[in-house]
Protein backbone atom coordinates (compact mmCIF):
# COMPACT_ATOMS: atom_id res chain seq x y z
CA UNK A 1 0.00 0.00 0.00
CA UNK A 2 1.15 3.49 -0.85
CA UNK A 3 0.33 5.05 2.52
CA UNK A 4 0.42 8.65 1.34
CA UNK A 5 -1.94 7.96 -1.58
CA UNK A 6 -4.24 6.01 0.71
CA UNK A 7 -4.39 8.87 3.21
CA UNK A 8 -5.09 11.40 0.47
CA UNK A 9 -7.92 9.24 -0.85
CA UNK A 10 -9.36 8.76 2.63
CA UNK A 11 -9.34 12.49 3.46
CA UNK A 12 -11.04 13.33 0.17
CA UNK A 13 -13.76 10.77 0.85
CA UNK A 14 -14.33 12.36 4.27
CA UNK A 15 -14.55 15.82 2.76
CA UNK A 16 -16.69 14.96 -0.25
CA UNK A 17 -18.70 12.11 1.29
CA UNK A 18 -18.48 10.41 -2.08
CA UNK A 19 -16.08 7.81 -3.50
CA UNK A 20 -16.61 8.84 -7.12
CA UNK A 21 -15.92 12.53 -6.42
CA UNK A 22 -12.74 11.67 -4.53
CA UNK A 23 -11.65 9.37 -7.35
CA UNK A 24 -12.19 12.08 -9.99
CA UNK A 25 -10.05 14.59 -8.07
CA UNK A 26 -7.26 12.04 -7.67
CA UNK A 27 -7.52 10.78 -11.24
CA UNK A 28 -8.05 7.17 -10.22
CA UNK A 29 -10.99 4.76 -10.16
CA UNK A 30 -13.58 4.62 -7.40
CA UNK A 31 -12.61 0.99 -6.92
CA UNK A 32 -9.03 2.07 -6.20
CA UNK A 33 -10.28 4.57 -3.63
CA UNK A 34 -12.23 1.77 -1.96
CA UNK A 35 -9.16 -0.46 -2.00
CA UNK A 36 -7.03 2.25 -0.32
CA UNK A 37 -9.57 2.72 2.46
CA UNK A 38 -9.91 -1.03 3.01
CA UNK A 39 -6.11 -1.29 3.32
CA UNK A 40 -6.10 1.52 5.89
CA UNK A 41 -8.85 -0.17 7.89
CA UNK A 42 -6.95 -3.46 7.88
CA UNK A 43 -3.76 -1.75 8.99
CA UNK A 44 -5.48 0.21 11.77
CA UNK A 45 -7.78 -2.60 12.85
CA UNK A 46 -10.93 -0.48 12.91
CA UNK A 47 -13.74 0.57 10.60
CA UNK A 48 -13.29 4.06 9.16
CA UNK A 49 -16.09 4.29 6.60
CA UNK A 50 -19.52 2.73 6.37
CA UNK A 51 -20.78 2.67 2.80
CA UNK A 52 -23.68 1.34 0.84
CA UNK A 53 -25.13 2.00 -2.58
CA UNK A 54 -26.67 5.30 -1.50
CA UNK A 55 -24.29 7.11 0.82
CA UNK A 56 -21.00 7.17 2.71
CA UNK A 57 -20.90 7.54 6.50
CA UNK A 58 -17.73 8.21 8.47
CA UNK A 59 -17.51 6.28 11.73
CA UNK A 60 -16.54 7.91 15.02
CA UNK A 61 -13.07 6.38 14.73
CA UNK A 62 -12.91 7.50 11.12
CA UNK A 63 -13.81 11.07 11.99
CA UNK A 64 -11.15 11.19 14.70
CA UNK A 65 -8.58 9.74 12.28
CA UNK A 66 -9.47 12.35 9.66
CA UNK A 67 -9.05 15.19 12.15
CA UNK A 68 -5.59 13.91 13.04
CA UNK A 69 -4.42 13.15 9.51
CA UNK A 70 -5.83 16.07 7.52
CA UNK A 71 -3.60 18.80 9.07
CA UNK A 72 -0.54 16.61 8.53
CA UNK A 73 -1.33 16.17 4.83
CA UNK A 74 -1.97 19.90 4.41
CA UNK A 75 1.34 20.68 6.11
CA UNK A 76 3.14 18.19 3.87
CA UNK A 77 1.63 19.76 0.76
CA UNK A 78 2.64 23.25 1.91
CA UNK A 79 6.20 22.06 2.56
CA UNK A 80 6.34 20.53 -0.92
CA UNK A 81 5.08 23.80 -2.39
CA UNK A 82 7.61 25.83 -0.43
CA UNK A 83 10.48 23.59 -1.52
CA UNK A 84 9.47 23.96 -5.15
CA UNK A 85 9.59 27.74 -4.73
CA UNK A 86 13.32 27.65 -3.98
CA UNK A 87 13.95 27.36 -7.69
CA UNK A 88 11.56 30.21 -8.39
CA UNK A 89 11.57 33.96 -7.85
CA UNK A 90 9.14 35.18 -5.17
CA UNK A 91 6.19 37.00 -6.67
CA UNK A 92 2.77 38.34 -5.73
CA UNK A 93 1.53 40.69 -3.01
CA UNK A 94 3.29 40.96 0.37
CA UNK A 95 1.35 42.91 3.01
CA UNK A 96 3.59 44.42 5.73
CA UNK A 97 2.82 46.55 8.77
CA UNK A 98 5.12 48.54 11.05
CA UNK A 99 4.95 51.57 13.32
CA UNK A 100 4.73 55.02 11.79
CA UNK A 101 8.08 56.12 13.25
CA UNK A 102 10.07 53.03 12.30
CA UNK A 103 8.52 52.73 8.86
CA UNK A 104 8.77 56.38 7.85
CA UNK A 105 12.35 56.82 9.06
CA UNK A 106 14.04 53.56 8.11
CA UNK A 107 12.10 51.43 5.65
CA UNK A 108 12.52 53.44 2.46
CA UNK A 109 16.08 52.16 1.91
CA UNK A 110 15.08 48.65 2.94
CA UNK A 111 12.23 48.66 0.41
CA UNK A 112 14.58 49.85 -2.32
CA UNK A 113 17.01 47.03 -1.55
CA UNK A 114 14.27 44.42 -1.58
CA UNK A 115 12.74 45.61 -4.84
CA UNK A 116 16.11 45.51 -6.59
CA UNK A 117 16.41 41.85 -5.61
CA UNK A 118 12.77 40.78 -6.00
CA UNK A 119 10.94 43.06 -8.46
CA UNK A 120 8.08 40.57 -8.93
CA UNK A 121 6.85 41.10 -5.35
CA UNK A 122 4.29 43.89 -4.88
CA UNK A 123 4.86 45.43 -1.44
CA UNK A 124 1.77 46.75 0.36
CA UNK A 125 2.87 48.73 3.46
CA UNK A 126 0.62 49.76 6.35
CA UNK A 127 2.08 52.22 8.88
CA UNK A 128 0.21 52.24 12.19
CA UNK A 129 0.98 52.44 15.88
CA UNK A 130 -2.11 50.43 16.78
CA UNK A 131 -1.78 46.71 17.53
CA UNK A 132 -3.00 44.63 14.59
CA UNK A 133 -4.45 41.16 14.32
CA UNK A 134 -2.49 39.62 11.48
CA UNK A 135 -5.30 37.27 10.52
CA UNK A 136 -8.19 39.74 10.70
CA UNK A 137 -6.26 42.40 8.78
CA UNK A 138 -4.78 39.99 6.22
CA UNK A 139 -1.26 41.14 7.10
CA UNK A 140 1.58 38.78 6.17
CA UNK A 141 4.38 40.37 8.19
CA UNK A 142 4.59 42.85 11.08
CA UNK A 143 7.59 44.68 12.56
CA UNK A 144 7.22 45.69 16.20
CA UNK A 145 9.48 46.91 19.02
CA UNK A 146 9.35 45.54 22.58
CA UNK A 147 11.58 44.16 25.37
CA UNK A 148 10.04 40.77 24.60
CA UNK A 149 7.10 39.34 22.71
CA UNK A 150 5.87 36.21 24.48
CA UNK A 151 2.77 35.67 22.32
CA UNK A 152 3.23 32.20 20.83
CA UNK A 153 0.33 32.56 18.39
CA UNK A 154 2.77 34.02 15.84
CA UNK A 155 6.24 33.12 14.63
CA UNK A 156 8.77 35.69 15.88
CA UNK A 157 12.26 36.59 14.64
CA UNK A 158 14.66 39.19 16.01
CA UNK A 159 15.70 41.76 13.38
CA UNK A 160 17.73 44.43 15.20
CA UNK A 161 18.41 45.98 18.61
CA UNK A 162 17.82 49.48 19.95
CA UNK A 163 17.20 50.92 23.44
CA UNK A 164 14.25 52.53 25.21
CA UNK A 165 15.27 55.65 27.11
CA UNK A 166 14.16 59.03 28.45
CA UNK A 167 15.04 62.12 26.41
CA UNK A 168 14.91 65.88 26.98
CA UNK A 169 16.45 68.98 25.45
CA UNK A 170 19.28 70.94 27.07
CA UNK A 171 16.98 73.98 27.24
CA UNK A 172 14.39 72.00 29.18
CA UNK A 173 17.02 70.62 31.57
CA UNK A 174 18.50 74.10 32.16
CA UNK A 175 15.05 75.46 33.00
CA UNK A 176 13.62 72.55 35.00
CA UNK A 177 16.63 70.70 36.31
CA UNK A 178 17.70 67.10 35.77
CA UNK A 179 15.53 64.40 37.41
CA UNK A 180 17.61 62.12 39.64
CA UNK A 181 15.13 59.30 40.33
CA UNK A 182 11.59 58.07 39.69
CA UNK A 183 10.09 60.26 42.41
CA UNK A 184 11.61 63.47 41.08
CA UNK A 185 10.53 62.50 37.56
CA UNK A 186 6.90 62.94 38.61
CA UNK A 187 7.47 66.69 39.01
CA UNK A 188 8.44 67.12 35.33
CA UNK A 189 6.48 67.72 32.15
CA UNK A 190 6.06 64.18 30.79
CA UNK A 191 4.87 63.70 27.24
CA UNK A 192 3.23 60.32 26.70
CA UNK A 193 3.04 58.24 23.54
CA UNK A 194 -0.34 56.49 23.58
CA UNK A 195 -1.71 53.80 21.26
CA UNK A 196 1.35 51.85 22.25
CA UNK A 197 1.54 48.08 22.80
CA UNK A 198 3.22 48.99 26.11
CA UNK A 199 -0.06 50.32 27.54
CA UNK A 200 -0.68 53.37 29.72
CA UNK A 201 2.73 53.43 31.41
CA UNK A 202 6.45 53.80 30.83
CA UNK A 203 8.88 50.92 31.11
CA UNK A 204 12.06 51.09 33.20
CA UNK A 205 14.93 48.70 33.75
CA UNK A 206 15.43 48.18 37.49
CA UNK A 207 18.37 45.79 37.90
CA UNK A 208 17.13 42.52 36.36
CA UNK A 209 13.47 43.53 36.30
CA UNK A 210 11.46 45.64 33.87
CA UNK A 211 8.98 47.79 35.79
CA UNK A 212 5.80 49.39 34.45
CA UNK A 213 5.10 52.80 35.97
CA UNK A 214 2.17 55.11 35.28
CA UNK A 215 3.09 58.76 35.72
CA UNK A 216 1.23 62.10 35.61
CA UNK A 217 1.37 62.94 31.91
CA UNK A 218 1.38 66.60 30.85
CA UNK A 219 -0.20 65.64 27.51
CA UNK A 220 -0.19 62.74 25.09
CA UNK A 221 -0.28 61.87 21.41
CA UNK A 222 -0.41 58.80 19.20
CA UNK A 223 2.28 60.28 16.95
CA UNK A 224 5.88 59.81 18.03
CA UNK A 225 7.26 62.42 15.63
CA UNK A 226 5.07 65.12 17.22
CA UNK A 227 6.34 64.15 20.69
CA UNK A 228 9.95 64.14 19.48
CA UNK A 229 9.54 67.64 18.04
CA UNK A 230 7.90 68.90 21.24
CA UNK A 231 10.69 67.48 23.40
CA UNK A 232 13.34 68.96 21.10
CA UNK A 233 11.64 72.36 21.52
CA UNK A 234 11.93 72.06 25.32
CA UNK A 235 8.31 71.18 26.15
CA UNK A 236 9.10 68.15 28.31
CA UNK A 237 10.50 64.66 28.73
CA UNK A 238 9.66 61.76 26.42
CA UNK A 239 10.35 58.04 26.49
CA UNK A 240 11.20 56.69 23.06
CA UNK A 241 13.34 54.09 21.30
CA UNK A 242 16.71 55.44 20.23
CA UNK A 243 16.01 54.85 16.53
CA UNK A 244 13.04 57.24 16.82
CA UNK A 245 15.10 60.15 18.21
CA UNK A 246 18.49 59.38 16.63
CA UNK A 247 18.48 62.42 14.33
CA UNK A 248 17.62 64.71 17.27
CA UNK A 249 20.41 63.21 19.38
CA UNK A 250 22.92 63.48 16.54
CA UNK A 251 22.04 67.17 16.09
CA UNK A 252 22.25 67.87 19.83
CA UNK A 253 18.55 68.65 20.21
CA UNK A 254 17.87 65.79 22.65
CA UNK A 255 19.93 64.23 25.45
CA UNK A 256 19.41 60.95 27.26
CA UNK A 257 18.47 61.32 30.94
CA UNK A 258 18.30 58.78 33.79
CA UNK A 259 20.35 56.27 31.75
CA UNK A 260 20.48 53.78 34.64
CA UNK A 261 16.80 53.03 33.96
CA UNK A 262 17.26 52.60 30.20
CA UNK A 263 16.01 49.33 28.71
CA UNK A 264 18.64 47.81 26.46
CA UNK A 265 18.46 45.96 24.35
CA UNK A 266 15.02 46.71 23.05
CA UNK A 267 14.36 44.30 20.19
CA UNK A 268 12.81 44.98 16.82
CA UNK A 269 10.85 41.85 15.98
CA UNK A 270 9.36 40.45 12.80
CA UNK A 271 6.12 38.58 13.46
CA UNK A 272 4.11 36.51 11.02
CA UNK A 273 1.26 34.00 11.27
CA UNK A 274 1.91 30.28 10.97
CA UNK A 275 0.22 30.27 7.57
CA UNK A 276 3.21 32.31 6.29
CA UNK A 277 5.85 30.05 7.85
CA UNK A 278 7.02 28.72 4.48
CA UNK A 279 6.28 31.80 2.39
CA UNK A 280 9.26 32.68 0.23
CA UNK A 281 8.10 36.32 0.10
CA UNK A 282 8.13 36.59 3.90
CA UNK A 283 11.42 34.72 4.25
CA UNK A 284 13.25 36.86 1.69
CA UNK A 285 11.95 40.14 3.15
CA UNK A 286 13.09 39.16 6.65
CA UNK A 287 16.52 38.15 5.31
CA UNK A 288 16.89 41.48 3.49
CA UNK A 289 15.71 43.39 6.59
CA UNK A 290 18.29 41.69 8.82
CA UNK A 291 21.06 42.40 6.34
CA UNK A 292 19.93 46.02 5.86
CA UNK A 293 19.88 46.88 9.57
CA UNK A 294 23.22 45.13 10.15
CA UNK A 295 24.84 47.16 7.37
CA UNK A 296 23.29 50.56 8.03
CA UNK A 297 22.42 50.67 11.71
CA UNK A 298 24.68 48.16 13.44
CA UNK A 299 26.78 50.63 15.48
CA UNK A 300 24.02 52.60 17.17
CA UNK A 301 20.36 52.10 16.39
Image (cartoon, rainbow, N blue to C red):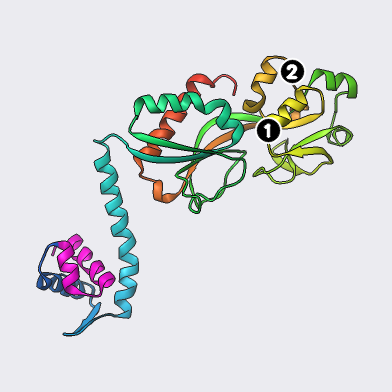
Residue 224 tag number: 1
Residue 61 visible somewhere in the drawing: yes
Residue 239 tag number: none
| Residue for badge 2 | 253
> How packed is label 2: few (under 14 Cα within 10 Å), some, or many (20 or more)?
many
Compared across the picture, whether 47 is left or right of 172 comes to left
- The segment highlighted magenta reads 1-26
Q: Is residue 202 above or below residue 135?
A: above
Q: Could you tell me which residue is drawn at 81 percent across and 23 percent down?
A: 234
Q: Could you tell me which residue is drawn at 43 percent across and 34 percent down?
A: 286
Name the spot of residue 218 as percent of width and height, x first: 84, 37
Front residue (pair 115, 186): 115
> How packed is label 1: few (under 14 Cα within 10 Å), some, or many (20 or more)?
many
Decide whether residue 228 is among the magenta residues: no
Q: Could you tell me which residue is drawn at 80 percent across and 38 percent down?
A: 219
Decide whether residue 17 is among the magenta residues: yes
Front residue (pair 292, 137): 137
Amino acid sequence: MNKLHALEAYCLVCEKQNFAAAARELGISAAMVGKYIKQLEEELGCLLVMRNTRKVSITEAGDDYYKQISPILKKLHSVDQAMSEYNQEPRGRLSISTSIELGSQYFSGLIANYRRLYPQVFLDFHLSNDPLDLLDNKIDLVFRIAPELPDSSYIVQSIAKTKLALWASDSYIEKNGLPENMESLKKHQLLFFNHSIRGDHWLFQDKEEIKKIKLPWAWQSNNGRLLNEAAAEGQGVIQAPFYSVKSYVDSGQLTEILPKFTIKPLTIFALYPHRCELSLKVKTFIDVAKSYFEQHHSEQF
